[in-house]
Amino acid sequence: MSPADDDRQNPLPPSSGKGPDAGMPLGARRLVLIGGLCVPVGLVAGPYLLGLQILAVGGVVAVAVALSYGPGRTWFSRWSWLTVAAGAVWMAATIAYWGTIVAAADASAPLSGWSPVLFNIGVGGLVIMAAATAGGVLTRYRFRRAAAAAAAARG
């Protein structure tokens, strides 16, 4: 009998530190570390080098993607893809919005009509990204509850 056969016959409890629901995967942990470092750097350096505030937005997107990981072997789930797409929309809209503000300031002109549209697109991307992250968290929670209930029912 191999160790793999033993694992199938005697599954580990949900919080044992091994198996598909052992906690945050390494890739997600790395994203939290990178995103967590980008946020304060972007916030501190933003007032001095205009444009580095985008680094803070990228850090928030990275942390959201990391928190939307799915249960099982492949941690990058459907929720992660939705979080990435919405985060990319938010980041692109933020960059474009920032560009319209800088262009208007350089030309000493009023903001273009696109500025409120870009702002609303960015807010929509942020809301969808937050919802997708919450969806990933709830999916993991339900998966772990079902695994714990199945383990309790077996023995």
Image (cartoon, grey):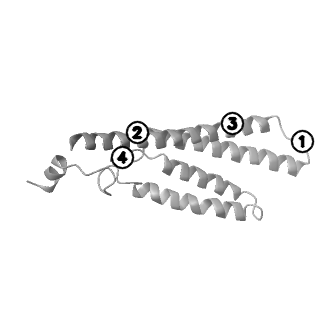
How many residues crowd around disc 4 within 10 Å: few (fewer than 14), some, or many (20 or more)? few
Q: Which residue is drawn at 55% across and 40% down?
A: 85
Amino acid residing under circle 4: Thr
Find the distance from the CA under tag 4 to the CA under tag 3. Answer: 31 Å
Which quadrant would residue 130 be assigned to in this image?
top right
Real-space Cα distance between discs 4 and 1?
Answer: 49 Å
Q: Mark 4 points at which residue?
A: 74
Looking at the picture, tell me which residue is in the foreground, 15 or 90. Answer: 15
The extreme left residue here reads 1
**Mark 3, residues whose alpha carbon is within 10 Å: few (<14), some, or many (≥20)?**
some
**Circle 4 — which element?**
loop
Query: For the residue marked with disc 3, what is the amino acid?
Result: Ile
Q: Name the residue under label 3.
A: 121
The answer to which quarter of the image holds residue 145 is: top left
In this rendering, which labeled residue sits more in front, label 1 or label 3?
3
Closest to the camera, between mark 4 and mark 2, is 2
Do callouts 4 and 3 mark residues in contact (Cβ within 8 Å)?
no
Task: Please give the label number shown on residue 110.
Answer: 1
Residue 8: mark in rendering: none
Which amino acid does the dot numbered 1 rest on? Pro
Q: What element carries label 1?
A: loop
Residue of label 2: 142
